[in-house]
Structures are given as structure tokens and as C-alpha cells.
Amino acid sequence: MSIVQPLATQQTSPTPGNHLHKRDSNFGLRLSLSLACELAAIRPACFTAIEFLAAQGVHPDHLAACELALIEACNNAVLYARPESRHLPIEVELVCQPRRLELQVIDHTDGFEWPSELQLPELDAEHGRGLFIIRSLMDHAFYLRGPAENRLVMRKEFSVYAHEAQTDENQTLAKPSNGSTSGSKPMLEAEYKLALNEQVLTTMAQELCVQVVNSKLEKEKLDNRLLARELDIARNIQQSLLPKTFPDLPGFGLSGFCLSARQVGGDFYDVLPLSNQCVLLVVADVMGKGVPAALFAATLRTLVRTTVDWTRRPSELLGRIHQQMFDELSGVDMFITAQLALVDLANQRLVVANAGHCPLFMTNLEGETISVSPEGMPLGIVPQMNFVDQVLRLENIHSVLLYTDGLTEARNPEGEWFGRERLLKWLGQPTNRLHSASELSEGFLKELDAFQCCAPIKDDQTFLILAAENAARKSAFSEQTIFAK
């Protein structure tokens, strides 16, 4: 934000776009700049100031001196600003009068005492060069310290304008602040050039550091946006791998749910129709979260679908998949827990095989809840592994629940686990025997949401429900809803 106005007028609050380029023969012009308290804002503001001075006819030699003095003063205003005042802008004012040029920088630092005598600091000194350079470049400089803000005033007098330039060499050489003439002229020139060169290098280095940091931050922001977009695509792909419809299984309904703790996860479920009276239910949990777990989950899904054509025994199916995935899993120190359940209506049986997974829960028509967990270690633990089948009769089964440990390990805001006991208690409620698979899913999600409340999800949550449905309700639930987020 900048304001250019005749000094004879009353200055008001800066208004963007208000520019007056007119020289008053008695009062001159004033430029007011307001810049953010950050190093990156200094160079553009100083460039605007120098353009203004050049437009007023300031001699090029004085333009360079004014630019360096402004940069140094603004640098100090940023570097030493109080933390609670960094939201306040740095104000810069330039006053062009016929025989004098005045630069003012208003800061919000703790301020300092202006030294009575300015000399070139030692080579290893950390402070003092800036003040020495400002005093060397300007004819007069002084510091007004206040309780809320401070004002550094720098002045150039005599022939500051190009049309008034004189050839007197003494007018281009800065005088010591105490008026002393001690020391030879070559020595003063050497000190001046040394300090000037050092300050130029320091300023360039600071600006280069700011540009490098800003460039790195912009690259990180871009990379994060690209990564977020890629993860969104991966999430959509993973969700598309879940069954979109469930097969029509006479006398039973199916419903499933899968929610990843991150954009993608290692949980998944699948339902493979093998005939009009036989389906294979699959629930698996890959160790870990994120992209690696999602890749192994997709691989497992593909292997299950391709290997099931060779055998319909869940235990043998797990064995073959274990042999094909062991090298890849063990190579990255990962494993997979899985549970397979073959629903065989023709023989009225449920065949279950387990690879280190959570127990399968089953309720009968009398309201009893049974935990089923055949022996078997997770896939990828040991090279040779035998799995076993456990056979259950379907005649007396009302519901079957396959799930991952993200359900039992869900926590409420107080840190309490949902746990298996709470899951068993909910599943065994007498009213659940009147519900279909989709109604059981809806009821359990409400129960889980009420428990978790606003607590963040730490692990993927997945379950698959098989429930008996009477003939009167069969038509109403021939098409099941899949609950997935």
C-alpha cells in the first residue's frame, strides 16, 4: 500500500490507488509505504521507494545510497520486531523537498539507544555494521524511541537531485557523526567501501535465503496437494473393489461395512458367489495402514478370487494363498489375518477357516452366542502353515458376524475400548433375532457411533453380516444395502 501526496496537504489513512505525482515548489512530495513485517516484503517496497525517488529527479548516486539504507533499516525492523507486534506493518515514509531528502522507517521493536559515536565494528562483531553504513550513506541520521513504536530518520541534503549535482567530491563522502576530521581520507574511503560491500553481500544472502525457503515451502505445498489427490484416487479405487451388490441367498441376507482410518487401509471384505446355493465370505486385515496395507489387501482379494476356482475348502484356499504371498509379506515384515466362511445351503453347513483373525461370532435361534475360531496363524509369519476347517450346521443359525479388530479396539473419548464383551452383548440381544442383515448393520453402526462419539478412529473398521430372513420378509430384502464410507 502506498500514498503519494503534496506535503502541504493533510495526510489521511492510506487508500490503495491514490497516487499524486506533482511537485510542489515549496513543500515537495511525500510517499508513504506500509509493508508486512517479513523479509520477503522488503525488496518490493524498497523498489517502489527508489522508483518514486528516481521520478523526483534524485541523482543515481544518491538512489543507491538510499536503497541500501532503507534495506538495512527495514531488515532491522523485521529481525528485531517483538513477537506480539509482528502482525503490525512496518511504515516507510519518503519526503522530497527542494534541498533535502528525508527517509523514515517506523518499527515495532524494543528499540535501542543511538550511539554517540559510530565506528566500523570489528570483523567478528555481530551487530553495529548496519548503523555504521546508514550513517556513512546519509548526511544525518537519528533515532526516535517511543513506547509503542520507534522512528529512524535519515536525511540527505545539498545536491540530492540530478540537475543540482555538484562535482565536489566531499559532498559524496559521508562525514563522521561527531564531526571529527581525524583520520586520512583514503582510510575513510576504505572503511566505507568495506562496510558497503559487506552489507551488500549480507543483504543478498538474506534475500536468497528467503527465496530458497519460500520456494521449498511452495514445493512442499504442491507435493502435498498432489499426494492428497493421489490418495483420494486410491481411496475411490479401493472402495470400488468392495461388492456393489450381494448375491441372492435363499433364506439369508447379507450386509457389509468398511471404513478406513486413513484415505486407504488394509481392511476389506468380499462375497464370492460359487453357485446359487453357495457363497464364500471373506474378511481380512493387513497389518498396518496406508498405501502398503492397501496394496497387499488388493493383492489378497485378487488371489482369493483366482484361487477359489481350484478349491472350495476354506482351509486349503488359505494354504495356497499363504504360499503365494509369504515371500512378499516376510520381505517387508508384514502379515495378514483373514477369515473365510463357506455358506453351503445345499448341505446346510457353514465351513470356517481362520488365519490368526478375530473369532467369528454366531447366534442361534435360541439367542445363544457362539465364538468360532479354528486354529491358524496369520499369513506371512512362517513358511509352512496348515489351516483347518470347522463345520457348523446352518439349520439353527440366525446370524453370523465376521469383523476386524478395528471394531473391538474402537475407543470412546475417555479411552475405553469397545471390546468383545460389548460386541457379544449387542449381537445377542433378543430383538436382533427379528432383524434382517441390513437392519443389524444399521443398528450396530448406531451403537458404535454412540460409543465412539467424537473420538478419532485409530484403526480400520470392517464387518460382514449373514442373517436368516423369513419368507414374509425375504422379498423386502432381496437387494441388500452395502454400508461403506
Image (spheres, rainbow, N blue to C red):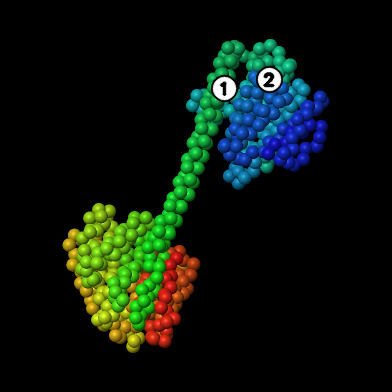
Q: Name which residue lies at 70% across and 36% down.
A: 2
Rendering coords of residue 340 (x, y %):
28, 70
| Callout 1 crowding tier (Cα within 10 Å): few <14, some 14–19, many ≥20 | many
At a point 72% along the width and 39% down the height, the residue shown is 17
| Residue 417: % across, % down | 39, 70
Question: Which quadrant would the N terminus be assigned to in this image?
Answer: top right
The three-letter code of the residue at mark 1 reads Leu
Q: Is residue 373 above or below residue 150?
A: below
Q: Quadrant of residue 7?
A: top right
Position of 137 compared to 428: left or right? Answer: right
Give residue 24's position: percent from left, percent from top.
Answer: 80, 27
- Give the secondary structure at mark 1: helix
Task: Report which quarter residue 293 is drawn in.
Answer: bottom left
Q: At 25% across and 67% down in the image, what residue appears?
A: 308
> Nearest the camera: 478 or 6?
478
Confirm or deny contact between disc 2 and disc 1 (CB under 8 A): no
Query: The C terminus is located in which quarter?
Result: bottom left
**Which residue in the protein does label 2 denote?**
59
Q: Is residue 145 visible?
A: no
- Give the secondary structure at mark 2: loop
The reply, left or right, for residue 86 in relation to residue 250 is right
- Give the labeled residue for mark 1: 196
